[in-house]
Image (cartoon, helix red, strand yellow):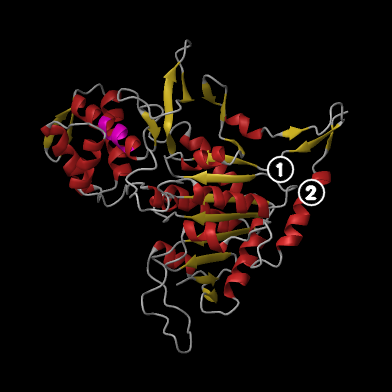
């Protein structure tokens, strides 16, 4: 049974109990998809159905299982350090990686052979080995699909939900609008797999063929085609997007060049044990905890949400990363034409806070998401409830311009898409 509530400016606007609620919800989402500068922020919740492991509130036992799955064994000193860091960082593997990276940077800056942890001295080699093993184990755990039961509907078609999601979003958006920007904190390559399977073109910041190197200026490129030989006008390729992996990717690695500088390359697979995958917060340079390319990708995200007539749709992201939250809150404060839609199934409405009779305003939780949903700002929309998931968005809640009976406005959207070809022609004379 569907269970969702749409909060707008801190108040209930729609819910699954409304007799016409689903149609109106689709209309609302459809309007957001037509905003001139549209961007998505996709978090781990979009990949949990594919077996993506949790990286927060991870126990030592669960962490050791991750190491075992990657065929990595820890020395007793490494396991002791991991246990103390997991306890100090409340099981957050990203923060554990950050601590290890910071310790290495500090030691190398001062040319130290050891660092102190919990009143005990640890050699730099122990810190280095644990950081390398954790990096590799986490990257291997993000190779999806993983640990999916054979009875799961995603066992045979793992990318189906992602494909359906992007099919609907790209089809619903008018073709003459600027390219949609997709930001993700995920290391996995589920989005890339789904787009490849659907033959959707996307810019991911890399150029090259046999050796794909990160060149952020490539995001300024676009795709056009000529329908007839010799035609002087070009048509814009209708389905394409820009993808930004702001926490890195399991198939990124740093490589040295002849000049001595380093560059980010796409490996096509998880880097080897001795070759660190560039996943946050593994620094590009040991002396910079948030160096290239992370700082540059965050700058692009900040510029995007600060643009005029912009909207951000957030799915599967729990607002646990303050460096990202800060940029979103800043856009809400400084950009009057910015709107925000957050889709999250939990941590927003208190249980049993909305009895059936009377349908009063729901009581919101004292959490990041609850406080965000409570803002008296009509630009802030939060879709919550047990069925407010990435899978439900893809299968049910997104408008479908393919002509389904449930979407009476689909024909107009489809006509707009077809009619946009003329608007996208470019004279090349």
Does 312 appear above or below 425?
below
The residue sitting at the top extreme is: 258
Quarter of the rendering containing residue 331:
bottom right
Q: Residue at x 56, y 63 (%)?
A: 397
Q: Residue at x 40, y 52 (%)?
A: 49
Q: Which mark is residue 238?
A: 1
Q: Residue at x 25, y 21 (%)?
A: 111
Q: Position of residue 230 (x, y in %)?
A: 87, 26
Q: Which mark is residue 420?
A: 2
Image quarter in which the C terminus is found = top right
Q: Is residue 284 left or right of residue 147?
A: right
Decide which of 233, 253 is in the foreground and name it: 233
Mark 2 lies on a secondary structure that is: helix
Mark 1 lies on a secondary structure that is: loop
Q: Position of residue 271 (x, y in %)?
A: 37, 26
Q: Residue at x 63, y 61 (%)?
A: 399
Image quarter in which the N terminus is found = bottom left
Q: Distance between the Cα atoms at labels 2 and 1?
A: 9 Å
Looking at marks 2 and 1 on the same chain, the residue that comes earlier in the sequence is marked by: 1
Quarter of the rendering containing residue 287:
top left
* Mark 1 surroundings within 10 Å by alpha-carbon count, few (fewer than 14), some (14 through 19), many (20 or more): many
Q: Which residues are magenta?
A: 133-138
Q: Is residue 118 left or right of residue 385?
A: left
Q: Position of residue 231 (x, y in %)?
A: 87, 30
Decide which of 157, 386 is in the foreground and name it: 157
The residue sitting at the bottom extreme is: 357
Query: Does the CB distance between marks 2 and 1 fall below 8 Å?
Result: yes
Decide which of 157, 88 is in the foreground and name it: 157
Q: Is residue 364 magenta?
A: no
């Amino acid at each position: 049974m569907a269970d969702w509530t749409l909060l707008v400016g801190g108040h209930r606007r729609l819910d699954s109990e409304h007799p016409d609620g689903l149609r109106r919800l689709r209309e609302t989402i459809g309007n957001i998809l037509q905003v001139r500068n549209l961007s998505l922020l996709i978090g781990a919740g979009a990949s949990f159905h594919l077996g993506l492991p949790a990286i927060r509130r991870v126990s030592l036992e669960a962490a050791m299982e991750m190491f075992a799955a990657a065929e990595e064994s820890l020395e007793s000193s490494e396991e002791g350090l991991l246990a103390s860091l997991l306890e100090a960082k409340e099981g957050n593997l990203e923060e554990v990686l950050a601590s290890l990276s910071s310790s290495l940077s500090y030691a190398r800056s001062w040319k130290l052979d050891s660092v102190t942890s919990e009143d005990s001295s640890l050699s730099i080699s122990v810190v280095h080995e644990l950081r390398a093993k954790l990096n590799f184990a986490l990257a291997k755990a993000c190779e999806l699909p993983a640990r999916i039961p054979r009875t799961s509907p995603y066992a045979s078609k793992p990318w189906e939900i992602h494909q359906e999601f992007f099919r609907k979003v790209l089809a619903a958006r008018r073709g003459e609008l600027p390219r949609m920007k997709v930001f993700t904190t995920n290391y996995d390559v589920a989005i890339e797999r789904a787009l490849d399977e659907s033959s959707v073109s996307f810019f991911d910041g890399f150029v090259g063929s046999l050796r794909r190197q990160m060149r952020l200026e490539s995001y300024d490129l676009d795709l056009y085609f000529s329908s007839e030989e010799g035609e002087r006008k070009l048509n814009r390729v209708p389905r394409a997007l820009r993808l930004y992996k702001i926490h890195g990717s399991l198939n990124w690695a740093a490589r040295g060049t002849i000049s001595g500088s380093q560059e980010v390359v796409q490996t096509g697979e998880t880097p080897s044990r001795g070759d660190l995958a560039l996943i946050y917060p593994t620094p590009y340079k040991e002396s910079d905890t948030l160096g290239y390319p992370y700082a540059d990708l965050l700058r692009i995200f900040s510029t995007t949400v600060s643009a005029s007539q912009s909207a951000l749709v957030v799915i599967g992201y729990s607002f646990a990363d303050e460096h990202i939250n800060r940029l979103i809150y800043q856009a809400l404060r400084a950009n009057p034409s910015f709107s925000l839609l957050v889709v999250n199934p939990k941590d927003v409405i208190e249980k049993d806070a909305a009895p059936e009779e009377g349908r009063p305003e729901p009581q919101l939780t004292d959490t990041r998401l609850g406080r965000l949903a409570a803002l008296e700002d009509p630009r802030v929309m939060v879709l919550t409830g047990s069925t407010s998931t990435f899978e439900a968005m893809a299968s049910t809640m997104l408008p479908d311009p393919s002509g389904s009976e449930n979407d009476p406005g689909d024909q107009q959207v489809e006509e707009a898409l077809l009619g946009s070809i003329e608007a996208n022609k470019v004279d090349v004379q």
